[in-house]
């Protein structure tokens, strides 16, 4: 069965790769002159305002609603979608996500496991049959072991002689949470046994009379106790995956803006564009277009991960709260909204590739700090006061706040306060970046220093 999943993933990736190759060949063919001597349209001319009838109909709604900003945004979307970086980058990310989800299931599903169940206080034949059924459903071979006392059973749990202990048919005791990677107990078996024993207990209380059928349907699982608390869980694992994707996407999208602004300035295309649109419209259209592409890519990756996880039966995302996933998607949008203005202003001060490289490091320092601190907190499972303060600062909140949500160490009003602070900081950064962009984007002949722009503003 596990090889079927590999075939399904390959069936998705291979046609995608062939489609990309066919599109690349068609673009190369379009670059050559046509047989009648006509030439393809100049990409710069397509950015200038013109009759809306000459543009594809699917772009009319955005251009009509946003005007010149929408035109610039659609220009950015076309350039990113046609580029190889987005296609190959998305393909690589999908392959990595699929591997991260499928490989653990291949390892864990390498055959039936033997689960030794200790019994304290006796177990009825119906209960033993229910445990056997639970083992069969989870592909486990159940072996019962009678324990003379609860203290002996706990000692055997710690030593590993037994995996699960059933006490008097109404309690399930484990050494560590079944979801922990170091626990020998099968999570599916533990949950099924707890459910079945709860049903049997309710049947006994109901007396198997028809009038008590409703009580049977409302049976609750018996409590599952652990001798040691969980230090890491599936939610934390998901938080790590979300942090890695957040860091990768933010750096990728912001680098697009940084390089895009620099290339327009160095090629003097920006002078043509500014002849028809205002600087704030050009900058707003650029960040909006790249932002829409970023949102589409993030949605595709998350949807792909959920579909693959459901197809292979992976519990990598199953144990995580939906609130954690929603929070990480929200902060991806907020993080991009804040940093896109920072990188756009930085790109307007450079006009060569080497200048972009020197700018990228200082601009990415807050992202690196937030990412490193968040990985550390996820590993330890504890957030100190300094980390909680970082969750309210716009440069680091996109990394810190989702981790606090995953650790259940933040309330709804604290989360909302961080969102509002970040939105306010984004508006302030947008105003500041627009002023820097307007003063620096047309200045050539070398990198523009920030103190020169500030001094010019003072005049």
Image: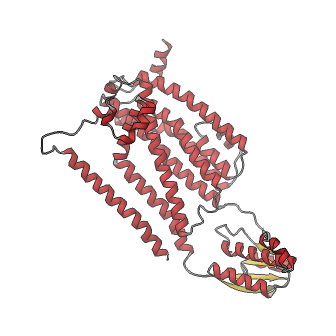
Q: 224 above or below 377? A: below
Q: Is residue 151 visible?
A: no
Q: Report which quarter residue 397 is drawn in.
A: top right
Q: Residue at x 50, y 14 (%)?
A: 458
Q: Residue at x 56, y 51 (%)?
A: 243
The answer to which of 222 and 68 lies nearer the viewer is 68
Q: Residue at x 54, y 69 (%)?
A: 104
Left or right: residue 114 versus residue 302 is right
Left or right: residue 386 versus residue 257 is right
The answer to which of 217 and 401 lies nearer the viewer is 217
Q: 421 above or below 253? A: above
**Count of picture labels:** 0
Left or right: residue 249 versus residue 59 is right
Q: Residue at x 67, y 60 (%)?
A: 232
Q: Where residue 192 sits in the image (x, y, percent)?
A: 70, 75
How are the colours assigned in the image?
secondary structure
The answer to which of 230 and 129 lies nearer the viewer is 129
Q: 400 above or below 343? A: below
Q: Is residue 173 visible?
A: yes
Q: Report which quarter residue 400 is drawn in.
A: top right
Q: Where residue 424 sits in the image (x, y, percent)?
A: 61, 31
Q: Where residue 338 sits in the image (x, y, percent)?
A: 54, 35
Please identify the residue farthest to the bottom as the structure is shown. Answer: 125
Please identify the residue farthest to the left as the structure is shown. Answer: 36
Q: 408 above or below 168? A: above
Q: Where residue 223 sits in the image (x, y, percent)?
A: 79, 69
Please identify the residue farthest to the top as the structure is shown. Answer: 459
Q: Report which quarter residue 199 is drawn in.
A: bottom right
């Amino acid at each position: 069965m596990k090889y079927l999943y590999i075939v399904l993933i390959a069936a998705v990736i291979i046609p995608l790769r062939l489609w990309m190759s066919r599109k690349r060949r068609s673009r190369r063919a379009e670059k050559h002159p046509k047989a009648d001597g006509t030439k393809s349209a100049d990409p710069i001319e397509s950015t200038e305002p013109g009759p809306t009838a000459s543009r594809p109909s699917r772009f009319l709604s955005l251009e009509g609603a946003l005007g010149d900003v929408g035109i610039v945004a659609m220009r950015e979307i076309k350039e990113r979608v046609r580029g190889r970086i987005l296609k190959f980058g998305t393909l690589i990310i999908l392959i990595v996500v699929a591997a991260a989800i499928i490989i653990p299931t291949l390892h864990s599903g390498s055959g039936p496991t033997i689960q030794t169940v200790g019994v304290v206080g006796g177990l009825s034949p119906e209960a033993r049959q229910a445990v056997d059924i639970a083992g069969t459903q989870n592909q486990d071979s159940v072996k019962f072991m009678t324990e003379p006392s609860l203290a002996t059973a706990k000692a055997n749990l710690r030593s590993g002689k037994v995996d699960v202990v059933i006490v008097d048919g109404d309690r399930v005791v484990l050494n560590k949470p079944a979801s922990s990677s170091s626990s020998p107990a099968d999570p599916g078996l533990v949950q099924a046994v707890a459910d079945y024993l709860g049903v049997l207990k309710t049947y006994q209380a109901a007396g198997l009379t028809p009038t008590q059928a409703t009580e049977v349907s409302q049976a609750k699982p018996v409590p599952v106790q652990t001798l040691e608390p969980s230090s890491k869980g599936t939610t934390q694992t998901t938080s790590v995956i979300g942090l890695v994707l957040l860091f990768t996407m933010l750096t990728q999208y912001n680098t697009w803006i940084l390089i895009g602004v620099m290339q327009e300035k160095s090629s003097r295309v920006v002078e043509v564009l500014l002849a028809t649109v205002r600087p704030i419209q050009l900058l707003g259209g650029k960040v909006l277009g790249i932002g829409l592409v970023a949102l589409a890519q993030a949605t595709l990756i998350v949807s792909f991960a959920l579909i693959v996880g459901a197809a292979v039966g992976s519990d990598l995302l199953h144990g995580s709260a939906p609130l954690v996933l929603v929070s990480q998607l929200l902060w991806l949008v907020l993080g991009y909204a804040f940093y896109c203005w920072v990188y756009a202003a930085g790109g307007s001060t450079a006009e060569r590739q080497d200048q972009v490289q020197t700018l990228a490091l200082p601009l990415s320092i807050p992202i690196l700090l937030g990412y490193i601190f968040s990985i550390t907190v996820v590993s330890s499972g504890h957030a100190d006061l300094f980390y909680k303060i970082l969750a309210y600062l716009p440069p680091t909140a996109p990394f810190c706040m989702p981790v606090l949500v995953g650790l259940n160490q933040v309330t709804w009003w604290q989360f909302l306060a961080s969102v509002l602070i970040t939105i306010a900081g984004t508006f302030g950064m947008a105003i500041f970046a627009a002023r820097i962009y307007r003063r620096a984007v047309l200045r050539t002949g070398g990198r523009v220093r920030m103190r020169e722009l500030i001094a010019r503003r003072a005049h």
